[in-house]
Each structure stands twice: as structure tokens, then as C-alpha cells.
Amino acid sequence: MRILIAHQTKIPVITYGGTERIMWWLGKELVRLGHQVTYLVNRVSTCPFAKILEYNHTKTLNDQIPEEINLVHLFFQPREEINKPYLVTNQGNVPNQDKFKPLDQNTIFVSKNHARRHKSECFVYNGIDTEEYGNSQLDVNRDYFHFLAKANWRAKNLNGAIKIARNAGEQIHVIGGSRINTKRRATHLFDNQIKFHGMVAGQLKNDILNHSKGLIFPVLWNEPFGIAMIESLYLGCPVFGTTHGSLPEIVNREVGFLSNSESELTTAILELEYSPETCQTYVMKNFTSELMTRRYLELYEQVLSGQKLNDKPPSAMSTFKEITPATLLP
């Protein structure tokens, strides 16, 4: 099959970029399974396993789809009727319908909760390419906890993660933000319990996770999926987070603990008894790029046969404010 994967962004990304990483891992796995992949992306993109075409904002999308393409996989909502069989992956939360149009009828979400909050049942779990995480050493000493997210995004709740770690008397390593931030609390700037790494990737990021006792992930929004969770689990780290969005789907009691109470999360950390091997095996059975790609291939066959993936166009049901817990406000 000849597949076009399209997004108005650059690939590959080195540090931050969840959608771009999923696009990359999907294309890589499709090629491994014998398909031909072309990316329609930002002009500065490069790729060793697929052809790159420059996305041109002055042209219609249909004008940029090569004739030989069998199926188009979009990672943004189209503004026009697509002339080829296509589907759309939505990685984020869509604001309320009163301000935004319904989504495309062939939209796919990234968790069951994510889909249902948009009046859909169609979803594919994200999956990681485990080759990018090297040879994890699950029997190493683990000396601290970590936070992995865009730290200046309030919904990810860095302040809450720091407070939970501090209450437990544990050091926390922050991946995804700098200590130098004019909006950050002064008490965080000179705290030896907090180590800021900024935006890191590759072996450095893997090493930080591989020596961590667990991910503290007290998000303050309906998390659509949370790649940080499965990355951490793969490298042997249980997840300690809130119960919002997809977290109850991704994290069970064998690989983590969920609560909207700071005191309960602190207690769970203090009573930590989790197996790094169990955490990694759980990801291998449920959240790899191979599993993700095979599920997408099933949906490709549906749209190629003329089926719509949703009975009617999905649309948003809830807002951020409706799920913000007062006990975890920063």
C-alpha cells in the first residue's frame, strides 16, 4: 500500500513533540511491514526510510496528494473534502462545540476516554518504538522520581508533582523545563530536591528515566493519552498520577497508583513496591508502535472499502474547568 502521512510540521523532532513522534514511529513500522510511506510535512524535514514532500500552505491539500497514493493519513483536521480514502488522527482535546465545528467523520482518537469525550468509539492507543530506548537496565539503583512533560504548561501540574515529591522526602528530576523561569515559584529555584534537565532526548533522557523510581504525573486536565507514561513504564518506572482522561485506561495497580489526593499519592510513593520488569512487560504487551500500526492498518482497510469510522462527526463534550481538582491545584 502507498500511504501519505501529512502534518504541517517538521520531522523528526528531537526533544518535544508527541504527534510528530507518533507519525515517525507509525511510518517506520509501516515500511517495516512492506508498505511505501510518503510524508507531506514542513520543508526542513528529513527521513531515511520514507520520501519527503513539502507541505505548501498556498495550495489545497488535494493538489498536494500524489496520484499514486492509495490512502491519506492526516494528523490535522482537513478543511476540504479529500479525494482519496483518508482518516484523521486527533491527538489533542478539542474545545467545546459551541465555538468549534464538529470533527471529520473519519477522526480517530488515542484512548477510549478521549474518544467518548468527543462522542466517538473509534480510537487507537499510541505506541512507542522500543528501539529508541536502548538496552534498558531494569536492575539498576533508582534514586529519585521524575516529572516528564512540558513544564510551563499548567495542566501538566509541575508544582503538584514537586509538592508530592517534597512531602515524600524524595528528590525529583524535571524533564521538559528549565529552572530559569520568571513564572516559577522562587521556592523551587534553590531547592536541592529539584533537579531541572530542560528539554532532553536520546540516551540522556533514557538514562534519567532508567534510574528513576517512578513518574509523578498529577495532570490537571483530561489527558488524551500521555506518551510520557508508557515511556516511563518501558524503562521500569511506575506511574503516580491523577484519575483524569486516559490515565485509568493506561495505568493499573500493577504498574502504578492513581488518586486525586496529594496525601494518597504521597503515601503510595512512600510505600513503593513495584517491579520494573512488570512495568516494561506491560508496555510490550499493550503499547508498542507495532501494535499501534497493526490497528491502524485495520482502519485503513475500512476506509478503503468506503466505510466511515464514525456514524456521525465527533464533537467535544467537556471543558478543562469541569475536571480541575481543588486538592491538586498548584
Image: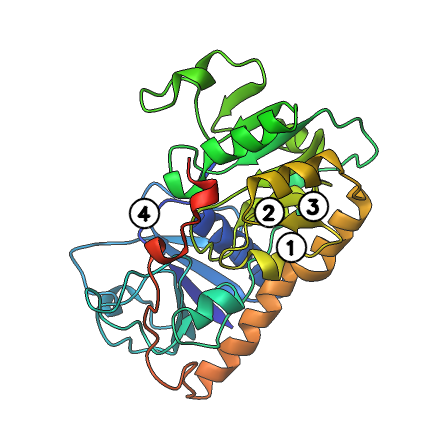
Identified by mark 4, the residue type is Asn
Which residue, given by chain and number where applicable, does mark 1 sit on? 251
> How busy is the neighbourhood of tag 3: few (under 14 within 10 Å), some, or many (20 plus)?
many
**Residue 58 rendering spot, x and y as whole percentages:** 15, 56
- Are discs 1 and 2 less than 8 Å apart at CB? yes
Position of residue 140 measured from the top left corner of the image (x, y, whole percent): 81, 29
Q: Of callouts 3 and 2, which one flags the residue occurring earlier in the amino acid sequence? A: 2
Residue 140 shown left or right of residue 102 in the figure: right
Question: Which tag, 1 or 3, sits closer to the chain's start?
Answer: 3
Residue that badge 3 annotates: 234
Q: Quadrant of residue 146?
A: top right
Along the line of sight, which residue is nearer the eye, 84 or 165? 165
Label 1 close to label 4 by CB (< 8 Å): no
254 above or below 217? below
Q: CA distance from mark 4 to mark 2?
A: 28 Å
Q: Is residue 28 visible?
A: yes
Of 103 and 194, nearer the camera is: 194
- Per the image, the residue denoted by label 4 is 42
Mark 1 in CB contact with mark 3 (< 8 angstroms):
no
Q: CA distance from mark 1 to mark 2?
A: 8 Å
Cα gap from disc 1 to disc 4, whole angstroms: 35 Å
Q: Pointer 4: residues within 10 angstroms few (<14), some, or many (20+)? A: some
State the SS at label 4: loop
Three-letter amino acid code of the residue under disc 2? Met
Disc 3 residue type (three-letter): Tyr
